[in-house]
Amino acid sequence: MASQDAAPDKLLLGAMGIAKEAQTPKDVMSRFGELLKSTYGIDQVIVKDRQGQLGTVDEFTINTGKPYVDNSLSSYSTFSELIRYYNEGFKCCMVLPIAKEGKSFGTVTLLSRNDQIFTQGLAEMLWVVSGLVSGEASVKFEKDKSLNLAKYFDASFNSMLPQLLVEQKGAIVKANKAAMNQFDRNQKELANEGLEDIFNISSEEIHKLMEGTAVSACARESGDRVFELTSNRINDALSHVLVRDVSLIREAKSKTFLMDNSDAEVFVVLDLNGRITWASQNMERMLKVNRDVVLGKSFFDFVENQRAVKDQIGSSRGTYTGHVSFNFGNDIEIGAKLTVLKSEGLMSCIISTDYDRFIKGLEKNFDDLVSLSNESIIHIDKSGYILSFNKSAERLFRLGKDSIGTQIYAICAEKESQDRLTSSIAIARANGFISDVFVNMLDLSGSQGIPCQQTIKAMTDEKDAVVGYLVVSRELLTKRELEQAREDGNRLARDVEKLKTESELKSQFIYNISHDLKTPITNIMGFSKLMLTDDFGPLTKEQRDNISIIYDESERFMQLVKQILDVAKLSSGIVKMDLQTVKFKDIEENPSIKSLAEACANKGLEFRWIVDQEVPGITADPNRLIQVFSNLISNAIKFTEKGSITVKVYRKGRSVRVDVTDTGIGISREDKTKIFKKFYQLKRGLVQQKGAGTGLGLSIAKEVVNLHRGSIGLVSDVGKGSTFWFTIPITPKMKKKTMQYNKSEIQEQQH
Ligand code: ADP
């Protein structure tokens, strides 16, 4: 606490001196950090700019414009950044926004390995001083930005893309090599002509371009090439203009139109690893698979006999042609001619469906297809007698064994439908095929009308003589069912909208409450601790005991608030995961885990950490993972009086499994199912266990494991001990949204 005696005015003078002398914002903030480090027991200062994707606590401070203080970091701290700091051994943290006139530039994070550093007084003073410093820094930020851009332009000199440094009125100050080549002029010639002459554009268009609108133009002497110009303003005088030749894109667009609408061939482009990067829109029509489903997937996974085909394509020079069977996962096998052209890091494939082979394939799989099909298929002979039917038809029309040999007309609803079926069969006999026939069929048992859309195909023998028909029926939804479906859709849309606002409200609530609840508790803790150091005069034993109780209880309260916030955050789905490759060796070395191992030893328990050799690194949020480990291990310590605690990590299929085994009191069968619920604690006799937590630890662990798409559970024997286990997929399939979150740190200083 002594460090707080440093006079604020001295700090202020120091800070202003720095702000004036330093050349760059990075410099300003780093020297400011040094100053604080020497006076206030701060161990690390991190400066982040606003450009990068910021972590949640930084977003929070930027959005609220107020500093954020956490004086007792723990694995339940509200933001995952804070949990990381805790895991790195820091005890308290203050995040200051850097802003000027409402425009934010980033944050400064102050970290300390000491307890309770940021009292309200100090926090307020730091805020004021940092405000003054960041005012100065902001001016330098602007300067730095334009310097950087100018530097960037020099770096672009060798870029393939034509680039120009242009004054607001269109005069060209600098051009890179590609621009000079493209327009066949040197720097000076380009400078003499300016944008207006080279691209034949008006001053209004130049003005629009400088305001940030993309402008298309044809360059004189570049034939019928079309260019798109875009600009980035560097400062009031200069803009950086990119020139893209879009004629090729236009040409390609007209070509793809032809491809998308071809009736003969499907076009697919693969990267060199065989992944599908583009497919023509006719894919769905011709190959019965939606192209969005296959984009990004490996093309050869859909090819029968894939290894042989791959080898042949690999060894062919330039072009490959062959017959291939495709199966896009919908159980339809399609035979086709495949042509592959290899060029410039891409493979262009042309698939022409080859119906002879397709039909052959169909025949082979005919029986399977008929029985598996979701459509109701009835096979009748030439005169309309039922020969066989598949499962769907059996269900829809309630056919049974005795239906074989009866007339199909028996399951037509009325005379009119019978007539329609008769004439349709006649057409199928003549043309081989008829579709979109609407017939009202019957349910054999209940005589209920079933409106159907039918397709009838004639079956022929080798001499093309008709031997029977396949009648394929699809039940039509009734008007009422259609209305119901529409209503369900609308209701779903409303629910989604409601959920969206609810979740936004929730996150807002968490942000606000985290601040509002924690500030007063911090003050209670700070002042009671100060009293215990006799700073306000000596205490009697009774006073000391009572104030200790205040301190301990407020600490417990703080822990509870943090856990509740964490649960709320985890279950509201607003958590951002910081996914990285995590090695279990690093987890073992982490200070939080090390201190648990120590707690084990202090209690006379043996602690073992066993990682199987073949366990790979996994993709996970390391700090969240440590949170799970801490919860399980600290529970194990809490409920074990003698014996050992063993953490075992091993591979299980595509996941890694972790077992935390103790030799403690165990958990009964009834309790096992409830234990992961929020606020659940087991009643063991009348007395609440000493050191019992809040009953939230396991539910947090479960949420974290779920967020990683893993699972969690336990095996236990009352009186003998428990094993809590969880699995984490080695590479989890995350939604893109949760994968964001990478910090950009301008500067990091380690003490
Ligand atoms: P708490 O914060 O109260 O520990 P948890 O959700 O972590 O909350 O645990 C809920 C309850 O489950 C605990 O109160 C305890 O009764 C029981 N429990 C958890 N881990 C163990 C264990 N390893 N052995 C016996 N009981 C346990």
Image (cartoon, helix red, strand yellow):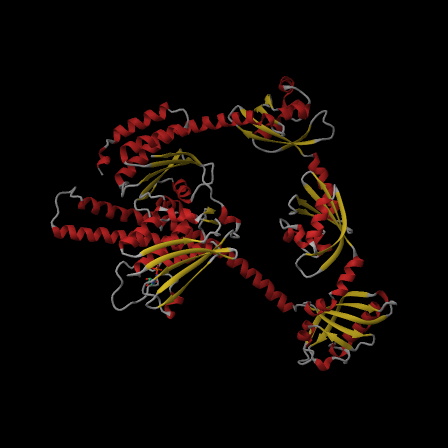
Q: Is 620 or 413 nearer to us in this picture?
A: 620
Vertical comparison of 81 with 644: above or below: above
Residue 124: image quadrant is top left
Left or right: residue 559 compared with residue 340: left
Vertical comparison of 597 with 450: above or below: above
Vertical comparison of 74 with 372: above or below: above
Point out residue 506 in the picture as x, y percentages from the top left corner: 42, 53
Q: Residue at x 15, y 42 (%)?
A: 536
Q: Residue at x 32, y 46 (%)?
A: 73
Point out residue 272 in the picture as x, y percentages from the top left corner: 66, 43
Point out residue 161 in the picture as x, y percentages from the top left corner: 62, 30
Most extreme residue toward the front is 613
Q: Which residue is drawn at 75% across and 77% down?
A: 414
User: In the image, ligand 1 is in what quadrant?
Assistant: bottom left
Position of the C terminus by quadrant: top left
Q: Is 633 or 534 nearer to us in this picture?
A: 633
Regarding residue 281, the answer to whether it shows in the image is: no
Point out residue 325 in the picture as x, y percentages from the top left corner: 73, 56
Left or right: residue 593 compared with residue 555: right
The image shows a total of numbered marks equal to: 0
Most extreme residue toward the bottom is 402
Position of the N terminus by quadrant: top left
Q: Is 608 or 370 nearer to us in this picture?
A: 608
